[in-house]
Image (cartoon, rainbow, N blue to C red):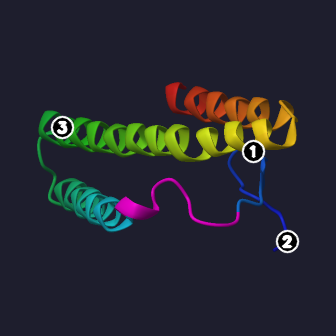
Amino acid sequence: MEATTDGISGTLENHEGPHGYTSDKEAYLRRLRRIEGQVRGIARMVEEDQYCIDILTQVAAINKALHAVSLGLVQDHMSHCVVGAAQEAERTGNPEIVSAKIQEATDAIGRLLR
């Protein structure tokens, strides 16, 4: 698999194998589809010239829903990818493996907090 730039942070994507969220993939997809529907609903509200505070209320709900998805993905990453890196670091004697995963998670959390 060739590494590609993700377009958001400029980091390289080259993460093969099952990901931490794989076991909950369908639940994530359901949540994201629900959020997608909410976004379409907001577009409809704007098209229909709805009251701005009502639109902002819906935007806040979407932000909260996206934050919940983000936190779940961070937890999945920590419990699967970072733990796996720690096990690999122990097996190979290379502590840089886990340091890189922790930095990757830290950077992702930083992007979420901006």
Q: Earlier in the sequence, mark 1 or mark 2?
A: 2
Question: Tag 2's secondary structure?
Answer: loop
At label 2, the amino acid type is Glu
Q: Is residue 50 above or below residue 28?
A: above
- Name the quarter where the N terminus is drawn: bottom right
- Judge left or right: residue 95 versus residue 51: right
Question: Tag 3's secondary structure?
Answer: helix
Question: Tag 1's secondary structure?
Answer: helix
Spatial separation of the CA atoms under disc 3 and disc 2: 46 Å
At label 1, the amino acid type is Glu
Snapshot quadrant of residue 17: bottom right
* Residue at far bottom of view: 1
At label 3, the amino acid type is Cys
The verdict on residue 14 being magenta is no
- Residue beneath the point at 57% across and 65% down: 18
Q: Which of 44/39 is in front? A: 39
Q: Check disc 1 and report the residue beneath it.
A: 88
Q: Check disc 3 and report the residue beneath it.
A: 52
